[in-house]
Image (tube, grey):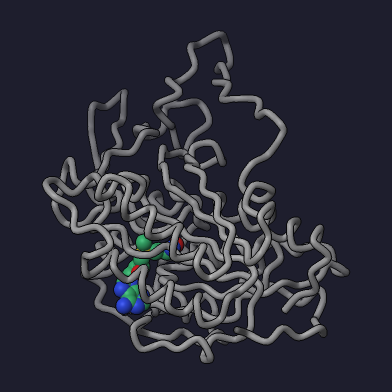
Amino acid sequence: MQKRANGHTNGLPMQNGTTIVAAAAPRFRAASLFSGIGGFDLGLEKAGFEITFQCEIDKFCRTILKHRWPKITCHENIKELTADAIPVSDVWAGGFPCQDVSLARMGSRAGLKGKRSGLFHEFARLIGEARPRVVLLENVAGLLSSHRGRDFATVIGTLAEFGYSVGWRVLNSKNFGVPQSRQRVYIVGCHRDVHGPGQILFEAECGSGNVAKSKQHGEAALSPFKTSIGEDDGDGPVYQSIAYCLYACSARHTGTDWSRTYVQYPKKGQVRRLTPKECEGVMGFPSGWTIPPLGKLREDDIDSLRYHALGNAVTPPVAEWLAHRIRDYLIASGEQPA
Ligand SMILES: C[S@@+](CC[C@H](N)C(=O)[O-])C[C@H]1O[C@@H](n2cnc3c(N)ncnc32)[C@H](O)[C@@H]1O
């Protein structure tokens, strides 16, 4: 089990120039696994966490992580990682690969026996060794039904065996200011605290719902299922807010195939692809987040690498919402940062 220190540093500047939480607030620490392009990391950092560690095997993603968090160690392969290499952290967050549990994959799903989604067991091995206070896992909603629920039972049961109380909730990014319907299951485990997951994942208050704004001069508002970008008067490019499932239009991977999501110009009857920059916006990432440093990669490859990495990512606004609630939970439980 990881040793917890009492001392901590308050009010340090953020790695990415993101929102700084009250200077006196305790600075909790978070490690990320299956870090991708840092969707969880960005949300955690915005909520005031200090990122301590990352782990990612994909070369392009590693380039982006290094660019955005130059001082953070990024381990390559989770299979070769041991818990003692991860700095003591309050929270571990990771979205393990979804390809083998995704409903977008036609035919039988290998589930947690698959080579990719089976990497959950590597994540679990490390959690079992270190037992951080809070673990946050993410995956496609198909995880809930893979092997008639037995895979999900394995995830929950494994965490429970390590002493975690576990809760889960399906959240849709479109309810967090992200112009895309993207449902994912978020699993929270709190070590030896039966109330923790409920406090983190569920709120008592009701939201105000989605209200479509009407345009000036009494014109009809754009359909809530469509989004116009670029210009205020609605003449800019329009794209479907409900993103297509990748597998429906491409067999390349099971994230969202941003390279095949088109925008249309209503007045000119033209269509085009979303640009990678627009995909960043549609995923809730800062503009330009996935642009690698000059000279690091071949120009021709960059767009498709950006589409792919964005398609796999966690939307930072959802990560940030969860991170704030985890932080509030840690503070309310009287926990000192690790
Ligand atoms: C669902 S994505 C997670 C994306 C991430 N949450 C984000 O916001 O970008 C899963 C990630 O696990 C990575 N991965 C796959 N096999 C791995 C391994 N053996 N070790 C470390 N990372 C791995 C993939 O490259 C991919 O980026």
Q: Quadrant of residue 148?
A: top left
Q: Position of residue 262 (x, y in %)?
A: 26, 39
Q: Quadrant of residue 45?
A: bottom right
Q: Nearer the viewer, residue 261 or 265?
A: 261
Ligand 1 in which quarter: bottom left
Residue 130 is at least partly visible in this image? yes
Q: Is residue 34 above or below residue 71?
A: above
Q: Position of residue 241 (x, y in %)?
A: 39, 34
**Residue at the farthest front position:** 161
Q: Position of residue 74 (x, y in %)?
A: 46, 84
Q: Nearer the viewer, residue 43 or 335?
A: 335
Residue 60 is at least partly visible in this image? no
Q: Which residue is rendered at x = 44% and y = 71% of the image?
A: 35
Q: Which residue is rendered at x = 44% and y = 50% of the image?
A: 283
- In the picture, measured across the screen, residue 238 lies left or right of residue 45, that is left
Which image quarter is the C terminus in? bottom right
Q: Is residue 190 above or below residue 147?
A: below
**Residue at the farthest right position:** 24
Which image quarter is the N terminus in? bottom right
Q: Which residue is rendered at x = 68% and y = 69% of the image?
A: 49
Q: Which residue is rendered at x = 64% and y = 42% of the image?
A: 202
In this rendering, the count of numbered labels is 0
- In the picture, measured across the screen, residue 263 lies left or right of residue 171, that is left
Q: Quadrant of residue 236?
A: top left
Q: Position of residue 52 (x, y in %)?
A: 60, 80
